[in-house]
Structures are given as C-alpha cells and as structure tokens.
Amino acid sequence: MNRVMDAQLYEALMAFPFPGEVVGAISYGSGHVHETYCVHVHGANQVCTQFILQKLNTTAFKKPVELMENITLVTDFLRQQALDKGEDPDLYLTVIRTKDKTSFYQDSEGEYWRLYPFITNSISYDRIKFPAHFYESAKAFGNFQKQLAAFDASRLHATIERFHDTRHRLELLDRAIENNYAGRLDEVEAEIKFINEKRHYGSYLLDLYDKGYLPLRVTHNDTKLNNVLFDRDTGKAIAVIDLDTVMPGLSAYDFGDSIRFGCTQADEDEKDLSKIRFDQALYDVFCKGFMEGVDGALTRKEIEVLPWGAYIMTYEVGVRFLTDYLDGDKYFHIARPEHNLDRCRTQLKFLEEMERNWDQMQIRV
Ligand code: ADP
Ligand code: GN1
Ligand code: MG
C-alpha cells in the first residue's frame, strides 16, 4: 500500500485475503449508516479488482455478531437458490471471509468490519434519473420478497429491535422532546405539532397485523433506491444490497420505503420544500414493477394497504430524523448541523403531498 492511511482502516484491510496488492481504499456511496470504502486491488497480470469494505455502525446495530449471522444466512440462501435455478450467483452479495475464516473482523479498537466483492460495473442512484430505473428497482425489491418467501424467518435475529414499530418510534421522539439533549426544542415546534396531529395514522398497519389481517414476511425493511445496484450500461437492476435490516416485517414496508425515497424528483435533504412533489407517474411505474416482482405472492389485503406503507414509512422516518436532531445527531450521518431537520422537513412535506394524491394512490385489487 503506497498511501498514508488511517491506521484502523489499514488494520482492517490486513485482516482480509485480497488477491493482490491493495492500492487504495476510498470512501464510497451515500449511505447514512455504515462507513463504506471501495478497495482497489492490483492482482497478477495487472488485473484490477474492487471490493466493498464496511465498518459497521454499532450505534445503529448493537448486535453486530448476530447481524453478520443474519447476513451470511440470507446471502448463502439467495446464492444457493440462484445456483439451483441456473442463475448467476455473483449477482448476490457474498460475505468474503477473513484470513481467519470468520465473516467479520473485529479490530483492536473493538470495531467490526466486513468485506463484499464489488458488484461489477454497478452504480447506485440517490435520485431517479429515468423512470425505468424506478421500475427496475420495484421489480428487484418485489422479487426479493418473493425469493425469501421460502426462507424460515425464525432463523433471523431482530438486528434492530422494533425497527418499524411506529408506536415505538413515537415513544422515542417523546423521550427526545423531554430530554431536549441538544437544546433544539424551540426550533421544531411546528414539526412536533404536525407529527402529533397524525399520530393515530402511525399504527394503522400494526393494528391490522395485530388483528390477523396481514401476514408477517421476510422483508428488506430499507428499500431506498440507493440500496439497489444498477448495471452502468444496461440500466437494469442487478442486485439488492444493504441487507442489515432483513427481518420479519410487512410487505407494505418495502413498497412504502421505496415510494418515500424515490417517488419525488427531490433529494431526501432538499432545503427548498417547494421541490418536494409526489410524482404520480413514478408511483404508477413503481406499482407495476413491484406487482411483477412479487408475482402473485401477496394477499388482496396486503395489496390494498400498500399505499399505507408509503404513508407510514414516510411518517416514521420523519419522526426518526426529528428524534435524532433533538438527540444531537447520534444516529444518522450528517454533513451540516441542520441536516436531520432538513430531512425531517422533506418527509413531512411529502406526507402532505401524499394526502393530496391519496385517491390516485389507491391500487385496484
Ligand atoms: P449504508 O447502510 O450505510 O447505506 P450500504 O450497504 O447501502 O450502506 O452501502 C453504501 C453504498 O455502497 C451503496 O449505496 C452502494 O452505492 C455501495 N455498495 C454497497 N455494497 C456494494 C457492492 N457489493 N458493490 C458495489 N457497490 C456497493
Ligand atoms: C438509513 O442505511 P441507509 O442509508 O440505507 C436507515 C433507514 C432510513 C434511511 C433514511 C439501518 O438507511 O432506516 O430509512 O437511512 N437505515 C437504518 O434515508 O437505520
Ligand atoms: Mg444503504
């Protein structure tokens, strides 16, 4: 390695059996949670290979060993299924074992690292470039649920307890308001009022689940557009990534989180709220792709409540961004002091947009 490099990163790199000389490790992607690096390796015959190295965020994921057990179970299952069907297994994430044959490396500071092959010729997008991308991502996420339908959910740990339990998210917000840790409470009165007015909607899906109207499935639970990789040349979705939150959940969560993030032409942290518009054409494109992807695997009731998934995921993330802002930005990575507040505001604006478009959002079953 010929560059000056952070000692912790260097230690982590040394733990993995790269097929050549590591010539660089560059901060990569725009995830809010882990520290992600693209590692460049020069092998024999001048062959250059890339890898994705991640330092796990243990504030978000408090049980990294269980988390890695989940990921290896799910990725091994998906690869085997692909092999059985004669599909390309390299389009699924594979956990590269350390020199000691473990699925992660714990460094001398106690932090956890993992390595994946870089999925070749791939790119992720933070915003829709072409509607076809959204359609492709919808098919990929829908299909992901279908592929995991045969996976025994009881083998999975809850990597984040009560991850999409909106009632719990509201309790955490209430606690943050009470503590006012970062002293920002006065700035966010309008946001708190807005959230309080809509509290009853937050539990709509969980109430249906509690009454037995919705089944529990193995879901991805973090279906942002940038958690799908696209082929740089063909624009086709090639892999679903970021499997840390694959857990039992409701199908509407996966549909909904994609709509929340992708069904607008604006960024999640846009400051100009007039740019946050619900894009009906993108919504229709997504519905088509998702239904094709799940391919008959959902019940009528699940399809009927998909729009609620979009509403509740948006509400829930808005609540989470505000909570983190009040707590002093401990969870989501930020690039500016008011970043989480800006993100919260885009979510609340998008909720209003969905309310205005609610009738057109309904899916005929
Ligand atoms: P986070 O949980 O922080 O969002 P991700 O696992 O989503 O972390 O990774 C962050 C970004 O890194 C992704 O959006 C994608 O651009 C890129 N990435 C992750 N894994 C791979 C991979 N195996 N091949 C290519 N790019 C990847
Ligand atoms: C985080 O990890 P990433 O950036 O794909 C978060 C999601 C939020 C999202 C908001 C584990 O997703 O739940 O919806 O930010 N992931 C975790 O952009 O908390
Ligand atoms: Mg991600």
Image (tube, helix red, strand yellow):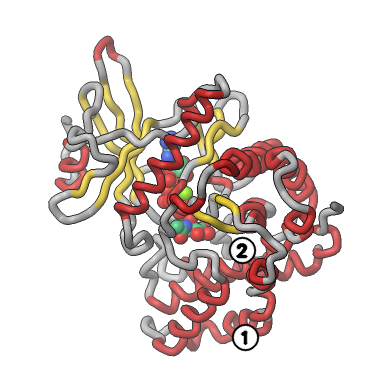
Select label 1 or label 2 by which is in front. 2
> Is disc 2's CB within 8 Å of ligand 2?
yes
Question: Which residue is under mark 1?
Answer: 193
Could you tell me if residue 149 is visible in this image? yes
- Furthest-top residue in view? 45
How crowded is the residue under tag 1: few (<14 C-alpha within 10 Å), some, or many (20+)?
Answer: few
**Separation (CA) of disc 1 from disc 2:** 19 Å
Decide if residue 265 is in sight here: no
Viewer-side residue, 40 vs 265: 40
Residue, disc 2: 313
Above or below, comparing residue 320 to residue 109 in the picture: below
Q: Residues within 10 Å of mark 2 (few under 14, many from 20)?
A: many
Pointer 1 with pointer 2, Cβ within 8 A: no
Give the residue at x 67% y 39%: 139
- Whichever of labels 1 and 2 marks the residue nearer the N terminus, that label is 1
Q: Residue at x 85, y 63 (%)?
A: 359
